Image: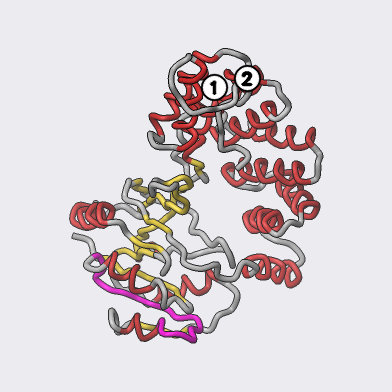
Amino acid sequence: MVTLSICMIVKNEEAVLERCLESIRGLWDELVVVDTGSTDATVAIAQRYTSQVFHYPWQDDFAAARNFSFTQAHMDYCMWIDADDLLLPKDREELLHLKETLDPSVDLVMMPYHTAFDANGSPTFSYERERWLRRDRQFRWQGAVHEAIPPSGKILHVGAAITHHKVGTGDPDRNLRILEGLLRQKGSLEPRQQYYYGRELLAHGQWIRAAQVLQDFLQQGQGWVENNLDACLVLSKCYQQLGQEERSLHALLHALTYTRPRGEVCCALGDHFMNRGQYEDAIFWYGTALHCPRPQTGAFVQEDCYGYRPALLLCVCYDRLGQRERAREYNELAGQFRPQDPSVLYNRNYFAQQAGHQGEDTPEEEVPQDTHNR
């Protein structure tokens, strides 16, 4: 059996730290907690679980703090987790089994990271992260924010996921502040940081600046393909906000130059044409999304773009073309992904009324609902 050091960096996490530690209790052979300046009960909570609580002065650099946490570890593998993450019981059991069976020649274990959920708790947004790292390989984090370790060596992909359940809003300006500080200090950003800088600018409503940053990022041609793809999606949103629809479309089409079509890109292209009443063109792209394989490459994955969402919007498009039987069929397909979804249930009543059966008193001119503009 391999041994495991769980390494955490924390600050003012009294609301969630105990929840996290209870969810991973029994998994670690060593628990390392690095506090970066808490003023609440975080340190006292951590000390109930481990004597290895260290203090590290915050330097606006997540990679530096995580690297410090790894230097305090002594077991075969290091696993990182944040205080507002947790392991669901089924995932905990899978990781306990992994400890018993892992081939010690594996250098790095990749695990899904679930960060957004629907009303039933099913993940709607996820991506793979490097999670267990063999200590003697001396992996090091890179990036002051959105830090990462470039995967290398013998890599194992597993299904056990880390679940992210944030409590409170935190500091929404922190990452932008750090990135702009780096930009002032160094005069430029590394490609991955530049990509995230564009995302942060969009989130703060700075659409013109975000578009400039992302255009520069893409033109430099030094980004990881998954960052390039997402940069195209984010750039398209910037141009939408600026009312530059042709540029928005071109950004989406540019995403197709990097790899095979992805569900997220195809759904965005479908949205572009549906919003203009070009339903047959929209049908082409939603239909393509419906048949896109879900990527297994560490990409940001909007789960609904690989089933529920294109099916529901195909229902809408076919209804607007007067092809109600096909529309009904796609609504039922959407229901296979989300059986109790309010839009799916609404649409069933709508189609029942159209067929002359008893249903909700829906005006005849109404069409099926979708979630696109909510």
**Residue 139 falls left or right of residue 372:** left
Residue 313: where, in percent of width, then height? 56, 28
Observer-nearest residue: 343 or 113? 343
Residue 250: where, in percent of width, then height? 74, 33
Q: Could you tell me how far apart the alpha carbons at marks 1 and 2 are, in whole angstroms?
A: 16 Å
Return the mark for residue 287: 1
Residue 325: where, in percent of width, then height? 49, 13
* 200 to 319, vertically: above or below: below
Reply yes or no: does residue 29 show up in magenta: yes
**Residue 28 falls left or right of residue 345:** left
Identity of the amino acid at label 1?
Gly
Q: Secondary structure at mark 1?
A: helix
Observer-nearest residue: 192 or 283? 283
Identity of the amino acid at label 2?
Arg
Residue under numbered circle 2: 320
Within 10 Å of the Cα at label 2, are there few (<14), some (14-19), or many (20+) other Cα atoms? some
Name the residue rendered at 73%, 56% in the picture: 205
Sequence order check, earlier mark of 1 and 2: 1
